[in-house]
Amino acid sequence: KDSVIDVIDDTKDLISLIKRKNICAPEDIVYKESPDGKHDYTDWSKALPDFLIWAFGK
């Protein structure tokens, strides 16, 4: 596998673990995957605003 696919698989595994262990409410978990996304500034700029609001509020 390539490293990007590994990271996606690892993230999904972590989400499953968090849900199984009831570490937080499932509705508090947000996972966005862009199937055609690239590892570049253009695609990051699409996801980053939502992350910043989640992390720091409005």
Image: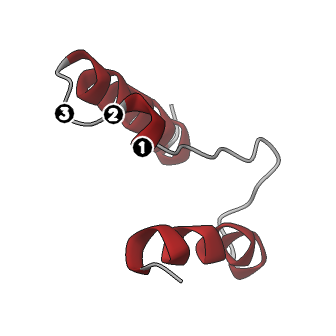
Number of the label disc, if any, that sits on residue 25:
2
Distance between mark 2 and mark 1 Cα atoms: 5 Å
Element carrying mark 2 = loop
Tell me the amino acid under the disc marked 1. Answer: Asp
Q: Is residue 42 above or below residue 8?
A: below
Q: Position of residue 7 (x, y in %)?
A: 43, 43
Residue 24 location (% of width, % of height):
26, 37
Judge left or right: residue 14 versus residue 46: left
Q: Cα distance, mark 3 to mark 2?
A: 7 Å
Tell me where residue 40 sits by quadrant: bottom right
| 50 horizontally vs 41: left or right | left
Quadrant the C terminus occupies:
bottom right
Give the number of callouts.
3
Q: Secondary structure at mark 1?
A: helix
The percent coordinates of residue 15 (x first, y second) are 36, 31
Dot 3: element: loop
Residue type, label 3? Ile
Query: Is 30 placed above or below 44 here?
Result: above
